[in-house]
Image (tube, rainbow, N blue to C red):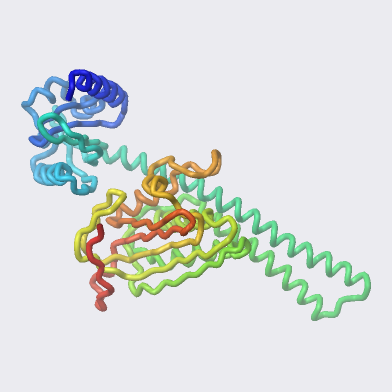
Amino acid sequence: MSEQETSFSEQVEGALRLMLDTLPLPIVEFNEEMKLLYVNRAVLSLTGHCGEELLSGNLILTDLVVLEDRNRLREAVGRALSFAPVEDIALTLITKNGKSCRAEFGFEVLFRRAKGYGARLCITPLERCRTHREQMFNMNSMETVGRLASNMVHDINNMLTVILGHADLAFMQNKKSPLSAPELLETVKAMRDAALRCTDLASEVLSFSKRRSEAVSRTDVHGLINRVARLFEFSSGRGIRTIVDLSANRPHVTASGSKLLDVIVNIIYNARDAMPSGGMLTVASKMETITVRRNSMYGFAPKPGEYLRISVSDTGSGMDAGVKARIFEPFFTTREAGRGSGLGLANVYDTVKNIGGFIEVTSAPDQGTQFDLYLPSADAAVQNAPQTVTAAG
């Protein structure tokens, strides 16, 4: 590397460090020997150490966690430096004054240094993680409720048209000649059915909008899908044919039912939005066993085991490789301004990852899109082993 290139590289690194110093997220850079190369101000605030103490070489990365967690941290570092996918891990951080707190360690960037490789690590106290996730979850829930309400108003307007149409028809016919009892009964029944449909729609959206418990429990995913399918029945009015094929014989996972409901709503809504001129929406389930650890495009590190696979496919516009690579980024959206916060799929990613699942996406421009959600089965002990899937990519 020339002197000019070295100077430019140092300038870029200096600008990056200046930016990292302003972030509230604790960030650490370290090398293959786990020697600390850089810490931002948030690390100093979190650990109670000064910069000289952390960067002197007397402390290494594993010294920041309690003894019983150091092997797990070493293993994660080894995987990161060997270019293997690494899940975020929760460890107990120990501060200079001996206090401890649980924190999430996430490996973000692998970079090349003159004497080898190094990695960048983000440390987030779990209390802060919960707060951020709850904020994102609530923002996305409000956006989803808004979308549901918007479609509900459209459907209720259609039902009111039916009610008013029958009422006007009955009034005009009765002017010419009195309606017979059967005719009157049929008209009233049609009006009543339309009114009940309005009530059902309003109840569904009001139920969805209530703050729901996030308690983890054994959840029937088929029940959630059927609930969403009922809510989206009116999609056929937009020229979208919906097929639901739930063939999995063990449809239970251990998760928050409300968060899984958000996952299903978001995936189906994105499929519907990709088909403004109509098409086919298919929701299917099946059981699959993963026998070999497989890599994922989106940073998941799925473990071998039995999974409930939920597939949602559409015949819509599809995505190019650039969009496909970014769909789970918070605030990334291809919608026009004001029509989405970009948090929907970010929350889908967060929920699926936190329960030990993973996501695969198949898409191409004008070829439609398929989301495959793999959720760890809560019924893995049940017999009748399903289809086996080997490692991918």
Residue at (69, 57) in percent of width and height: 157
Residue at (24, 24) in percent of width and height: 13
Along the line of sight, the residue nearer the viewer: 184 or 106: 106
Q: Quadrant of the N terminus?
A: top left
Q: Is residue 232 above or below residue 20?
A: below
Along the line of sight, the residue nearer the viewer: 324 or 203: 324
* Drawn side of residue 338 relative to residue 196, left or right: left
Q: Is residue 305 above or below residue 27?
A: below
Residue at (25, 75) in percent of width and height: 385
Residue at the left extreme of this rendering = 58
Q: Quadrant of residue 312?
A: bottom left
Q: Quadrant of residue 310?
A: bottom left
* Drawn side of residue 65 relative to residue 135, left or right: left
Where in the figure is residue 32, as x and y percent of width and height? 10, 36
Where in the figure is residue 29, as x and y percent of width and height? 18, 31
Q: From where the camera sits, is residue 266 visible?
A: no
Where in the figure is residue 232, as x and y percent of width and height? 55, 62
